[in-house]
Amino acid sequence: MLILGIDPGTATTGYGVIETLKKDYKVLDFGLIETNKDGEKGKRLIHINKELTSLIKKVKPDCIALEKLFFSVNAKTAMAVSQAIGVILYTAARANVTVFEYAPGTIKKVISGDGRSDKKMMQKALRKLLGAKVRSRAHGKTHFDNSADGLAVALCHAYNIEKGVSISG
Amino acid sequence: MLILGIDPGTATTGYGVIETLKKDYKVLDFGLIETNKDGEKGKRLIHINKELTSLIKKVKPDCIALEKLFFSVNAKTAMAVSQAIGVILYTAARANVTVFEYAPGTIKKVISGDGRSDKKMMQKALRKLLGAKVRSRAHGKTHFDNSADGLAVALCHAYNIEKGVSISG
């Protein structure tokens, strides 16, 4: 099964593609959908739609695992990210791909064993999980960190649908 | 100038179309985009996109006036409405129509003279403003009330771009 994991954002949407094998998984691809920070809202949303549509066509995922928004203190950011999520849900539905949503706490628990892990602990767990091979394919730390969040939610879904899949690295 | 006013929602999006004349305005159309409450999120967003695209094609507005979300206590609703707003912004940008966003308080101030008006006061002011002719075209109270919110933001934009437009009824 091919899972496309997405960590949504207006400026940077991280994604990762994994293939679940019998009791294992393989990282096939990862990357970022980036939008122009100075661009108009509508145009940035069009860009997310276009890039995601191309990605779905290329990857042909069986499903999408999407990180839910943690309702943070910053209401303005939360609204902007929710708008991006709206376009992602729309784009996935247009492409007939089912979306499974996971709360950040659930993803953290599956990846690091602790639902309240901070960013550093999560990155550490993910680096361990994804191995040097994946890390070396990333173009620098920012690229890896953001894509890793996409891979994390894909791994979380893999674990959820098939408890047999070991994601302990 | 033709203004399409939109009051966004996941279940019910109200809209109203006005034409600004020299120092007056005319209500051309109003109505609702409704989605199936039991439907999947993605499909509901596709429905909003389709209906709004048709509406823009039919009306050919010069611009869209959109009511901003008032960040309420109910985070779940706020996220769902923001997702719908994301698809509305995307749809408008795809149709090359500029969107102007107005906060609820601004709309209230323009329509009723008080930025903190409650729903009842707003409805009263709008009923007075839009006249019996418009009210009689609505299919019942719910239809009128929701469409009226769309008309309200359109009127707010008309007032904002052309202070000469009298919206005192």
Image: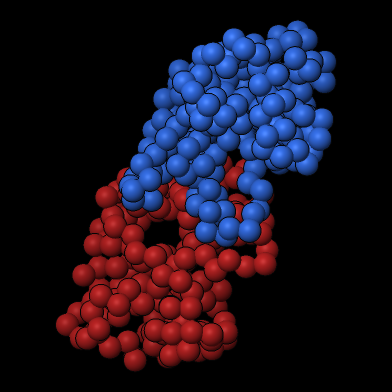
Chain colours: A blue, B red
State how many labels appear.
0
Q: Quadrant of the C terminus of chain B?
A: bottom left
Give B38 or A115, whichever is nearer the viewer.
A115
- Tell me the quarter of the picture where residue A104 sits: top right
Q: Position of residue A111 (x, y in %)?
A: 75, 27
Residue located 43% across and 90% down the image: B113
Q: Position of residue B128 (x, y in %)?
A: 42, 91
Above or below: residue A123 compared with residue A105: above
Q: Position of residue A127 (x, y in %)?
A: 66, 21
Does residue A148 appear left or right of residue A95 in this picture?
Answer: right
Above or below: residue B100 compared with residue B51: below
The answer to whether residue B161 of the structure is visible from this angle is: yes
Q: Position of residue A65 (x, y in %)?
A: 63, 31
Does residue B155 appear left or right of residue A53 in this picture?
Answer: left
Q: Quadrant of the N terminus of chain B?
A: bottom left
- Tell me the quarter of the picture where residue B18 sits: bottom left
Give A94 or B38, whichever is nearer the viewer.
A94
Residue located 53% across and 54% down the image: A77
Above or below: residue A67 compared with residue B33: above
Does residue B108 appear left or right of residue A125 in this picture?
Answer: left
Residue located 45% across and 32% down the image: A33
